[in-house]
Amino acid sequence: MNKLSGIFPPIPTPLVNGELAVDKLELNISKWNQTGLRGYVVMGSNGEAVFLTHNEKLKLTEAVKKHASPGKLLIAGTGSESIKETISLTNEVAGLGADYALVVTPSYYKSEMNHESFVTYFTMVADAVKIPVILYNVPKFTGVDMQAETVAKLADHPNIAGVKNSTENIRQLFEFATSTPDDFAVLAGTASVLYNGLTSGAAGGIVALANIAPDECVQILRLVESGKLPEALTLQQRMISVNNAVTSQYGVAGLKAAMDMLGYFGGDPRAPLLPLGEREKEVLKLIITKAGLV
Amino acid sequence: MNKLSGIFPPIPTPLVNGELAVDKLELNISKWNQTGLRGYVVMGSNGEAVFLTHNEKLKLTEAVKKHASPGKLLIAGTGSESIKETISLTNEVAGLGADYALVVTPSYYKSEMNHESFVTYFTMVADAVKIPVILYNVPKFTGVDMQAETVAKLADHPNIAGVKNSTENIRQLFEFATSTPDDFAVLAGTASVLYNGLTSGAAGGIVALANIAPDECVQILRLVESGKLPEALTLQQRMISVNNAVTSQYGVAGLKAAMDMLGYFGGDPRAPLLPLGEREKEVLKLIITKAGLV
Amino acid sequence: MNKLSGIFPPIPTPLVNGELAVDKLELNISKWNQTGLRGYVVMGSNGEAVFLTHNEKLKLTEAVKKHASPGKLLIAGTGSESIKETISLTNEVAGLGADYALVVTPSYYKSEMNHESFVTYFTMVADAVKIPVILYNVPKFTGVDMQAETVAKLADHPNIAGVKNSTENIRQLFEFATSTPDDFAVLAGTASVLYNGLTSGAAGGIVALANIAPDECVQILRLVESGKLPEALTLQQRMISVNNAVTSQYGVAGLKAAMDMLGYFGGDPRAPLLPLGEREKEVLKLIITKAGLV
Amino acid sequence: MNKLSGIFPPIPTPLVNGELAVDKLELNISKWNQTGLRGYVVMGSNGEAVFLTHNEKLKLTEAVKKHASPGKLLIAGTGSESIKETISLTNEVAGLGADYALVVTPSYYKSEMNHESFVTYFTMVADAVKIPVILYNVPKFTGVDMQAETVAKLADHPNIAGVKNSTENIRQLFEFATSTPDDFAVLAGTASVLYNGLTSGAAGGIVALANIAPDECVQILRLVESGKLPEALTLQQRMISVNNAVTSQYGVAGLKAAMDMLGYFGGDPRAPLLPLGEREKEVLKLIITKAGLV
């Protein structure tokens, strides 16, 4: 298998009155299909995976696969605390056409989630699943953080293809990159440091911003690849406020509201996440406008 | 309904070769039935609930109910990020005889878990379930912390009966106690501050230590109730090292190993939690012996 | 020397136009002299010690000693990162009549401040100073936290008389109390857990609230001593909002503003601390009134 | 004044038996004078400034100035909590030939150190001192962190020339760079992200590693300037272990021990910092050797 690379949006899950509305996917995906995005991630953190039932996850994966252009890769978030559930869901989505499984670190028993337990968990999962695993390190949601030696150890597993590092810690990212084989993909997990990740060993990124600014995210990658660093940094800088708005500032609700403003279907998040208020929407609109996205 | 009170052990889930072994429950529960414990908690953090499938949870609840003496209360841990799943599981365990549901705070989207989202979550759950809810605040595992104003607001709901506060923050505990009605039960969540909680408004405790030292935990409660504070503090102090060993130091694996040492069935935890090594077991044995439990 | 006990206010440093105004001390101390306070602490955290020059500290100590009733103890904050400076200042204030030195943990090189470095620091200081040392553990300002084994080790030094524990961690406080000799004084460092500390082994407290509610703080101590626990807890509970206002909510500026409202001289803090705005003063006034202090 | 740029070592303070030994500076500085280092920083965190008396600081500044080649810039760390002391010390070292003052953020009252208090502090200092100020943001020691809006505001002050950002947060660094004028110098504060900082807007670095690997640090800067990014990243990667050893792993004691191993005078740190043990020195030697520095 070729090394994983390129830009992927972790797509929001369309809901109407709190219920899964897969028919709303077609509009979004048809627009993204026309961009340089390398593929799609379903059931990531921005997909509200933790609120979805097992059956909803299958239905969602099937629908995204159906609408994605043939050349687009499909990555499905399948990790949970339970190894059994993770294996089972991964193999089901593999059967529905997912190319990779994005598997978040277990994290409930935080003080016991160390090198040995991470190696145990991911080895047991990777041994048993039919598609390659991408490690998913996201301390802001899990409260645990994988070290470079753990990623390096797991990179030796033939069925572990890469890592998504959803931190702004660039030192950690380039330690992941330099301590793993060349065909192991390190992916930036946030657009706030996409340029910095790409100039430090990352092969691409899975970034929330790519949902609403796919061309700009792809352009940052291409500028770095062609050695135009100042232009890449400038473009990233232009995106920093809007990226902040749809991640740390307003979260999934903000990302969905921004999609609505930009011609996609966004909708509301599922409870207990709450939709943006009117005032917050106005601020968001200003930020988006200032970034030149409308 | 009467106010909830007394001492409850959050019981470990018996596993043999990683598989649920409900036949091992009889030994443990028959011993606990003879103590002053007020009842049992299944599928708490010490029960490795996050590693159990839906069906395993039902089987486990049924088995504990079967072996518990008629007078013992049964509290079942049923919370997850998904409101749908939480309601559904709660109503199923209610049908199996659970008296209360212990519902952990949602926590994945940490920065958005505020007063409003907690109130939304717990209100939606409490409105829809057939047994009373106990709020479960456990920052060391969830990374989020409920404030007194949130607990006070939720205490007004007719189907929310209490809160388990699994922190050592006694200021927070007595704010919970003083800002809620008299029939709302505040329960200490760790034996390290059981005495302090009981002298600051708590009506009881759900504490890991009660699995291996039920008489001592009940005795601390009785000493406080009869005004013998120095004796209660001295007893708590004698338990502090062993409590630490089966919680922060060695976690669930330590609690299970201690049970094996003390005539209960303990066994190993489920992966990715790892069993104690020989050296750790020796240290644990010394701590237990020094505390006078053997 | 007798065991240190009782309630002490860490007194604010009076400033006029940013300059030390020792003449403003007489009013405050004359009022406090008439209460059951056991003595005074100068140059604590509430005394803005970090903003004072060496000479200002000497002048301040001298003035407080002059106005304090003969029976009141004088504790002077003298700790800094530098062992040399700490020893030198301590011996100078001893010459001015200070009875004890309150010495804060060194903290700049946080990751290296461990058991061994704390023992080194405090042993070198205690060996060289003429008055007994009180250890000062205040993680919210220093970012470091002393463990019970460190306090237990240092309690063996003949010139270390006690510890002020400025955390709400009651488990830690009673571990300090139970792991040190009977004549070693553990002092609560915040009124939010004064009752809880006193019922868990503390001999008294050095608490900001004692500046503006000396009678109430002393009363909590007396109620605990006479076994009237519910009354003590109720009184603490009545103080919790005002204590919060003059500590975590509004800090030193809040404490000084409250003093002005209650007939003491408070004044403004030194820059870069900023005085309260009008709106904040109104909120503070309401809180003080509701607590029954006016 | 020209924009500040280039690589600076924050030099350790030579001590013999715990006492300042300025005669040991000559050897070190004569070696550094022959490199491409842009100048020297005295009384930084690696200089154990918090343990030095006022007089020791003056003596040290004078000695470094004396030995530095004429073209080398001299930056003196002069910040403390007290605005008065900071101004006074800064003007004294200015008189001794210091070109810039490195002024650390005040930090004791952490929860009150916000935009407004930082602006107040640095404005009062910069208004009153005779040499330009470099802001020093170092959360690992201070526990406080300056935001981009604060740095942007302060960058407008005519006597504030730059900021040393001692974090690995590259997003923050480029926000500092993009929100300040072109002649405002953003300096990386740790060699672990020197390459990343330089490709994201930094004009240079003040990094502990430059004491023992001046040529390599200067080379990273030159490689970035000439667009040889992969070579720069590779060189940084070769330095990562040794940089870690002389910073987070072993601290100032490690840096001093490494200097002794590499032909400089290092010596021991001042108490309560403790020198490395024999075993730690062996590990350090291995790391230095593996990095190709001997």
Image: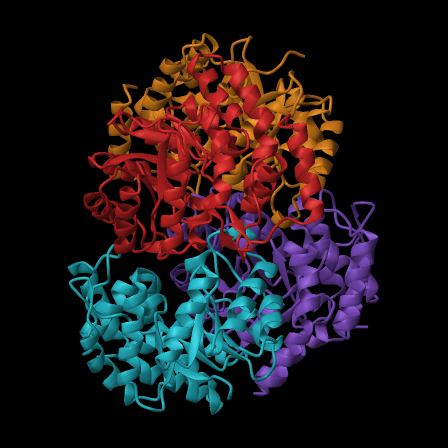
Chain colours: A orange, B purple, C cyan, D red
Count of marks overlaid on the render: 0
Q: Where is residue D266 in the image (x, y as percent from the top left)?
A: 56, 42
Question: Left or right: D157 with respect to D291?
Answer: left
Quadrant of image for the N terminus of chain D:
top left
Q: Can residue C191 be seen in this view?
A: no
Q: Which residue is drawn at 63% across and 71% down?
A: B7
Quadrant of image for the C terminus of chain D:
top right
Question: Left or right: B74 with respect to D111?
Answer: right
Q: Which residue is drawn at 81% across and 55% down?
A: B279
Above-or-below relation of C213 to D210: below
Question: Left or right: B261 with respect to D55?
Answer: right
Q: Which of A171 and C41 is in front in this view?
A: C41
Above-or-below relation of A173 to B168: above
Quarter assignment of residue D178: top left
Q: Position of residue D130 (x, y in %)?
A: 22, 41
Above-or-below relation of C9 to D190: below
Q: Residue at x 43, y 53 (%)?
A: D50
Q: Is residue B59 visible?
A: yes
Question: Left or right: A41 with respect to D282?
Answer: left
Above-or-below relation of B264 to D98: below
Quarter assignment of residue A286: top left
Q: Position of residue B194 (x, y in %)?
A: 59, 72
Q: Which of D106 and B159 is in front in this view?
A: D106
Q: Nearer the viewer, residue A216 or A211?
A: A216
Q: Position of residue A97 (x, y in %)?
A: 62, 17
